[in-house]
Amino acid sequence: MTSLALAAAVMTGGCGALEPRLPEAAPSIPAEWPMPATTAVPTVAAGATEASPGTPATADIGWRDFFVDPRLQEVIARSLANNRDLRVAVLNVERARALYRIQRADRVPSIEATAAMVRTGGDRPVTDAFTAGVGITEFELDLFGRVRNLSQAALQQYFAQEEARRSAQLTLIAEVANAYLTLAADQEQLRVVQLTLTTREEFHALTQKRYEFGAVSALDVSQSRTQVEAARADVARFSGQAAQTANALQLLVGAPVGTDLLPQAFGESVTGLAPLPAGLPSEVLLRRPDVLAAEHQLRADNANIGAARAAFFPSIKLTGSVGSASDELSGLFDAGTGIWLFAPQVNLPIFEGGRLRANLDVARADRDIALAQYERAIQSGFRDVADALALTTTLAEQRAARQATVDAATEADRLARARYAAGRDSYLVLLESQRTLYFSQQTLVATRLAEQTNRVTLYKALGGGWLERGP
């Protein structure tokens, strides 16, 4: 098709004909998530309710409704007000909005008022010339949609930045919650090891007295002393670990976090999320901010193809003004001084050395890259949700098993102490029971932390966290 024929077709069909149809994404993901098998083990925090058809979507559950700990709610609120990374994301939105307004301004003519005085002289007498007028300068008639497509691309970029801000807020909330939970777990580990240290010190003192009376050997004293020092080293290690986690939490918040806002205990009611209903479609991923940002970027790059195609056709720019001119300032607006100017300019690309074709190829490549990134965002989101769902039941089962292990180890340690005191077992039996109890207590805390953070991960993966209050 020749340029003139294509131009006629464009003018007949509308200026949007140069923008191609938005390609359909094919992320190749299942229609539904692999739901974990339902067991009798509770998988949600206390107070959570079973999902029902009237239950709002996870993306609509506000973070204040999900995180039920008042201290954590306040910490998250302060992070949203002070975190510097989120502040940068907000400023990027403002920048994208300003860029869109600049691009949109090209769709309407700019009207300017001018006034000038020209004085000439030399061998001739000095003369003055005064002019005043109002007019437009190089306003492009958007016959082929170039300006409109550029404006549309800028608008989609603005939308993408807004979704990026929401994604940054969602990520920040999840990071703050995980840091808060980790600090609570560190403090719980520290409490466990401090109790262990106290118990071992008391037992070491008792062993020392029994040694003085000749009831036990020096080996028992040395072994009990070893356990005391090992527990003391763990106290120092977990103290440092808790301090580092507190520093990380303060960095995320972007402001000092008082001791009144730090976790007081590692409870089970920090988060709450109702179980997902059976047959939950994977299309809910399309509401995730990162997926929406990728979609807007795809639309922006698709609009740029239309602008690149329009560059192959003539562009018409209008320059015009009306006003008056006079040799004297006092008579500038008298009758008979009116002047006008109309200067249309037509630019027809003839030879660009392949530049226009290369620009179009770049625009197409950018669109194809954006399409692949959009599909990748959907696939990544599907995996995030599937992974969190896979751990929902298994972590609950692990926690139940770890709790049973702690209960059994506690009873075994009590019996070992009694048998050792009665001289029926050696110190090695007691030592093994103490180690088993200590390890099982630490493992239980780690499992509880993994279960809590997985709830936060699932909440984030489903797109929740950018609303403060739910419907």
Image (cartoon, helix red, strand yellow):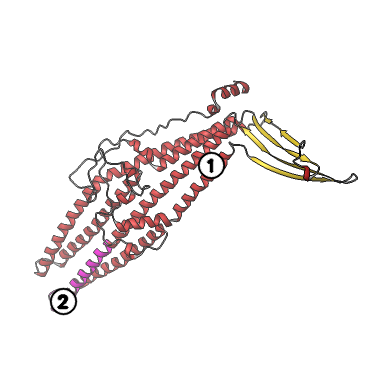
- As drawn, the label of residue 214 is none
Tell which tag, 1 or 2, sits nearer the viewer: 1
Residue position marked by numbered label 1 in the rendering: 100
Q: How would you rate the neighbour count of disc 2 (Cα within 10 Å): few for under 14, some for 14-19, many for 20 or more? A: some
Q: Quadrant of the C terminus?
A: top left
Task: Give the image location of residue 267, x and y in percent.
Answer: 25, 57
Q: Please give left or right for residue 206 compared with residue 142 in the image.
A: left
Task: Name the spot of residue 391 as percent of width and height, x first.
Answer: 27, 46
Is residue 79 shown in magenta? no
The mark tally for this picture is 2
Residue at the spot x=34%, y=62% of the render? Answer: 241
Q: Which residue is mark 2?
A: 211
Magenta span of residues: 188-217
In the rendered image, residue 80, in percent from the top left (x then y), is placed at 40, 54
Q: Secondary structure at mark 2?
A: helix
Q: Amino acid at mark 1?
A: Tyr
262 or 440: nearer the eye?
262
| Viewer-proximal residue among 129 and 384 | 129
Residue most extreme to the front = 335
Q: Is residue 420 above or below residue 33?
A: below
